[in-house]
Amino acid sequence: MTKTKTKAETLDWLRRISGELATATLKRLEDTLPWYAEMPPGRRSAVGLVAQAGISSFISWFDDPRSTPWIAADVFGAAPRELLRSVSLQQTLQLIKVTVEVVEERVASGSVDLREAILLYSRDIAFASADVYARAAEARGLWDARLEALVVDSILSGEADDELPSRIAALGWHGHGEACVLVGTTPRVLDVDMLRRTARHLDADVLIGVQGNRLVLVLGRAELPSTEPGDGEPVDEAEQAAADARTSSQLTFLDIAAKLEHGFGPGHLVLGHAVPSLIEASRSAKAALAGFAVAKSWRHAPRPVAADDLLPERALAGDNLAKTTLIERVYRPLKDYSGELVTTLWCYLDNGRSLEATARELFVHPNTVRYRLKRVSEVIGWDATGARESLILQAALILGAIAEPEPSRRRLTS
């Protein structure tokens, strides 16, 4: 009877001083935790409610730990939902520690059972707090995965809407510069964390989507901050040198794709062309998917391979984007620069890339043919003397001739 009476008296005493304990806890929080003192009044009030709920929950639990098991929601239920987003797990544990210290100091003269109960309760609520944050993180991770899949699907389908920028921002995308799309096969065991970790080490952003046997990565590379001084500002040579070094060492998207190659399954790996921003990534995705569909037709295609290196195969498969690209990047620039270059390139390719045969047909010296082919390379960036590049150029000439109005075609062939 004595032990029961003592516990009843202890409970009565704890209930009387619960308000005093809550006030002392808030004062200690403000004195010892800088993050609490810097909080807006509404958030401080919410944290105070959590501390007070913890004290009240302990008293109920001490009364009978077995009758109605307490749960973490008893303590955190008094706080608004956004408190979990503004107070970290570390800060929550600091809150528990301060509250327990205040209660221990106040009941230092109490019974051994009471002090042991405080230790047991503080341990359990610390674990419960971690569980609350773990569940929140798991739910947020599942939501982020669904959101990421939705964004990647929108990019692949080209069905971007006004909400796409906000969804991208919610995923923590840091890149504000160019973006491109990498398409390959899905491995038997997909290690998403490894892909993200590798991309992070390469200073690249990545969005990951799985569509059956296809693995799609949307890659981004943030623009380096400008170091150009403003009017009247001195130039810091050390900072400028460091910025120039960063710029010169910045990896290309093809380099980044090569570093991520081991995260894909066997088969071809195709990289779409770079676009100015993530909002425009659907154009890169369209090229990458078209290239992935025809990559098997190039026997010695590298891995990864740029989608633009598969322009002839894509055009033969009916890809209108590839046809337009070949005409606009090869045929039109050459024709606008000089009809003589177009004629020389036609003859050179029709004669099996023979300088002598081309020179005989055009009644010029072989060095003249060599000079004109060099000009072709300078104008369009492709070398007609290479086997693979000559295929690209011949496809461009054929498509350009087909696209020409009939009178222009007659003049060209005359």
Image (cartoon, rainbow, N blue to C red):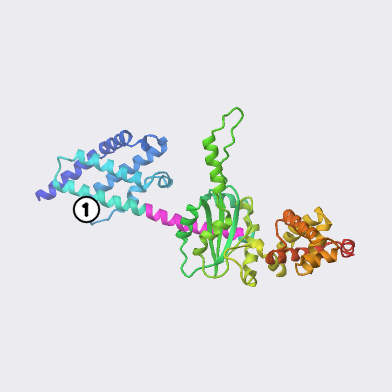
Q: Main secondary structure of the magenta part?
A: helix
Amino acid beneath label 1: Asp
101 lies above or below 126: above
Question: Can residue 159 be seen in the rendering of this structure?
Answer: no
**Secondary structure of residue under mark 1:** loop
Toward the left, the furthest residue is: 2
**Residue annotated with mark 1:** 64
Question: Can residue 240 be seen in the rendering of this structure?
Answer: yes
In the rendered image, residue 150, in percent from the top left (x then y), is placed at 56, 59
Q: Quadrant of residue 29?
A: top left
Q: Nearer the viewer, residue 77 or 178?
A: 178
Q: Quadrant of residue 35?
A: top left
State yes or no: residue 225 in magenta. Answer: no
83 lies above or below 411: above
Q: Quadrant of residue 297?
A: bottom right
In the rendered image, residue 364, in percent from the top left (x then y), is placed at 84, 61
Residue 291 in the figure: left or right of residue 16? right
Residue 322 in the figure: left or right of residue 32? right
In the rendered image, residue 340, in percent from the top left (x then y), is placed at 83, 58
Toward the top, the furthest residue is: 232
In the rendered image, residue 204, in percent from the top left (x then y), is placed at 52, 52
The residue that appears at 75% across and 65% down in the rendered structure is 394
Report the quarter where the C terminus lies.
bottom right
The residue that appears at 52% across and 37% down in the rendered structure is 239
Q: Residues within 10 Å of mark 1 (few under 14, many from 20)?
A: few
208 lies above or below 84: below
Residue 216 in the figure: left or right of residue 338? left
> In the rendered structure, which segment of residues is drawn in magenta?
133-155
Q: Nearer the viewer, residue 251 or 404?
A: 251
Q: Nearer the viewer, residue 64 or 301?
A: 301
State yes or no: residue 135 in magenta. Answer: yes
